[in-house]
Amino acid sequence: MSSTFTRRDFLRSGLIAGSAGIIVPTVLAKGVMAATNDQVHNDRVLVILQMGGGNDGLNTLVPLTDPAYRSLRPTVAIPASQALTLQGTSSVGLHPALTRTRSAFNSGNVAVVQGVGYPNPNYSHFQSMAVWQTADPALRAGDDGWLATFLNAQITGANQPLCTCALGEDSIPGEMRARQQPPVSVIGSGGDFRYWGGASQENTALSMYTNTPGPFGLMLDSTLRTLNGSVDALATASYAPSVSYTAPGATAPTDLATSFQLAAKIIVTEPATKIIHLSCGSFDTHQNQLTDQAALLADLDFAVSAFLADLTAHAQDSRVAVMTWSEFGRRAGENASGGTDHGSAGTVLLFGTPVRGGLAGAPCSLTDLDNDNLKHTTDFRSVYQSVIGDWLGGDATSVLGGTWPALSLFR
Amino acid sequence: VAHRRYVTAGRHLRKIAADARRDDVGVPLSRFTRRRLLATTGMGAGALALAPLLPLSRRVAAATPTPWPSPLHTPRAAAAHLLRRTSFGYNSATLDAAAAMPYRDLVESILAQAPQSPTFPDADTQCSRWKAAPVWIRHMATTASPFPERMALFWHGHLTSSSEKCPFEFNYMTLQIEMFRRFGLSDLRTLLVNFAYSAALMEWLDLQESTAGAPNENFARELMELFTLGPGNYTEGDVREAARALTGYRIQAYDAGGTPQPWPRWGPTQDQYVQTIHGLISQGWTWRGALVSGKHDSTSKTFLGRTGNWGLEGIIDIILAQPACATFVASKAIAHFMGVQVAADSSFVAEVASRFRQSGYDIKTLMRCIFRGGDTAAHPGVPVVNRFLTAPCYRGLLRTPIEYVIAATKATGWTTILDDCDWYTQMQGMMLLTPPNVSGWWHGDGYWVGSSTWLSRLNFASAVAWDGRASNPSPTTAVADQLDGVLSSATQSALGAQTSSSGRWYALLGSPEFQMS
């Protein structure tokens, strides 16, 4: 560990530890945020939505005319008559649960990237997740999360408590983890986000978590500062949703919709916010795929749609893009359980006013398979290249350790 | 499929809401409403976000300049350290008794604890996750044999299954936890075979669905990747061959005498079927896997280089013959009971794994190696250092939410809050009987650290400190016994600044020191 810990790392850790005690109050940050970004000078926000468990890309963007699709999947194929047709293509349609997504696609505000994967696919959930999270299929020991790398190097405001958020989570997501951990506000989906004992207990906690010795000291001290900063900021944030986050026919918002509503509140009230991570799932449909995936996609479809409508009503939609990812797509052929096993290439969705709508990448062949699995057509790092360079306005090459052919995903 | 869940805050929480009373320094406590719970799915997305390749604590360790001063050379601190890691906390009387024993005798007495089973008032309590989890938590907090419960919890977080995929009429998770309680200190083969046949696992990883001709790979893959060997010690071909060997196993009903019985017929209504199943559970019926030959692929398979007509036991035996299995399981146990820093020492792991394997995968041998730091029998006549009692092991772990909340009830003697601890631990990121995904919970301690999970720990400390004060012993004694008298200067100052007993308890229970093991 010491061999990989460079002097630069040490200096940075000192800076972070040192700055932890003097986090700029959010009210000040609002005024200076745009000017303090190290390399990135814009107010754009990336919302990254992890579709955990491995979402089946073939049933998300459904082949309508390829006979191989139906022969590979006698029971779990989406019938062409049920798939939602899209403007500009007759060869693919959307999963029938994605009704609002279809409308947005036809309005030019959704991009669907086809055949996204990486060479020598890994079929383990956790390893393939790590590949996507670190942008490194080689899984070198000590890889940092790609978003953490970006934040550390290119966003000075990354020390703001709400610059980087993970909502509906308990832990820092892998994309945001690094040896030099940038602050992440990790806010779960339950409980109220405030100190029951008010300011005195908040201050007592802060005073105790100061220069804590031992291997967890820095992590815990930093967590307390991020926590208190976020609690304070959200306690005074003035926001009311302009749309309902409860789906028609439901009695309450789902967890995902609740997290999206919190994301909207943060974006509307906190100009320092740069990256928000959300997650949904599980899409690990080894069995009962038709029912389970439909329910999950319907939840996603409604929650994203409500979120973007809310942002539009608050005149914030032009600053926000949503990108989904999943650790892999699923096996081309079905198994005996009405499901599909772990596979390779999948589908990435991008939503938002700034997104250049339409299909990107190329569909995978359903006949030229690699040991029953799809051969990817688009490297996932090309998506990252576009998101970092074209959307966030950063330097993708230094984050990805190379340059990948960018896709035209933004206006 | 994600289910929305609600729970009503417990009695003492409602009391706070009703009173909206003030604490000792005049700050109003916030009101409670019904709280929406973290809803996780079978392969829930929340913790899927965790990158297993990036152990946070190792990284933070690189940047941490100041170690805790270790008191483990004193018998009392060594006993407290061992109790923290083999039970769910202690009070001063328990510590007094433990500290009076020679360390090795204390280890042996802990390893010898006989498992005790919790008492379930009825079959419904065994079946409902919402009723079963609080029963288990109270049992962990009150049993005279906490170590078998720690082991059951360890295996529950490693060899995962979840209430999410169990049919609600049945007690599959309760049966699996009882199996961990019974076999958690036996040998790894017995444990793995019983785990593979447990109904909860068969539902969780789709063995119940897997059939010759179209095997479901779910269990075959995770058995090797997550449970026994780790990535890199098998091929995709091994996954497919093992999946074929694992086809054709189905959950079978057994009566109280262990005789197979026909599956209870569904109906005539859902409610009546539930009554039927609950009646059978009350009579001692159980449910576990059995081979159904017509659905099993009985042709030859080549698995990890060995060709034969393998079935479930054959696959497990071949896995156990791999040295990587001992290394992988030993490193999991070392990380959980000694910390990820020790688990990163590959020569130490190899030494423990070697003894584990030579013992026939005897789990007590493994745990003895851990708590005696590898000092058993390898160097006759030569004094060796007990790694478990060296400075890097001191406060080298964060308490999991379950350990934290129960330890607080032990330290204060206030146990009413145990009824609400299922809710509290969920807010802290741990939903008992419902792990976040198939990789379980034991990812190194950074896993438990988030903004709202840590806020929930502090709010729990607040609830205990203010609601439990009538029965609190002295916080001064607790500083000595619970924190070994080893405090950071910041915690020392914060404790000194408190003007009430409740304030001192809040500081003590919320302190970084009390979060550590």
Image (cartoon, coloured by chain):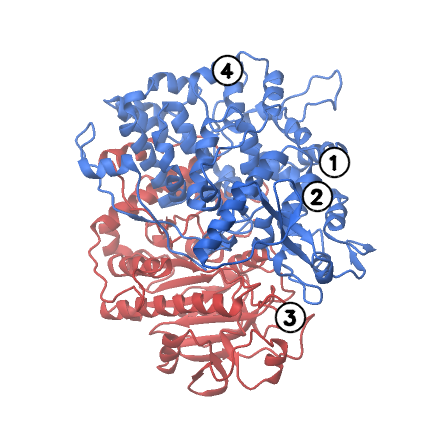
Chain colours: A red, B blue
Q: Nearer the viewer, residue A40 or B193?
A: B193
> What secondary structure is marked by label 1?
helix
What's the residue type where badge 4 is placed? Arg
Label number found at residue B357 = 1
| Three-letter code, disc 2 | Cys
Mark carried by residue B325: 2
Q: Mark 3 falls within which chain?
A: A
The answer to whether dots 2 and 1 both sit on one chain is: yes
Residue A298, visible in the rendered structure = yes
Check disc 4 and report the residue beneath it: B76
Q: Mark 3 points at which residue?
A: A373
Q: In this view, does B331 lie above or below B53?
A: above
3D distance between C-alphas at marks 4 and 1: 33 Å
Relative to the observer, which residue lies in front, B159 or A338? Answer: A338
Q: Is mark 2 on a helix, strand or loop?
A: helix
Q: How far apart are marks 1 and 3 (CA)?
A: 37 Å
Q: Which amino acid does label 3 sit on?
A: Asn
Q: Badges 2 and 1: C-beta atoms under 8 Å apart?
A: yes
B452 left or right of B357 in image: left
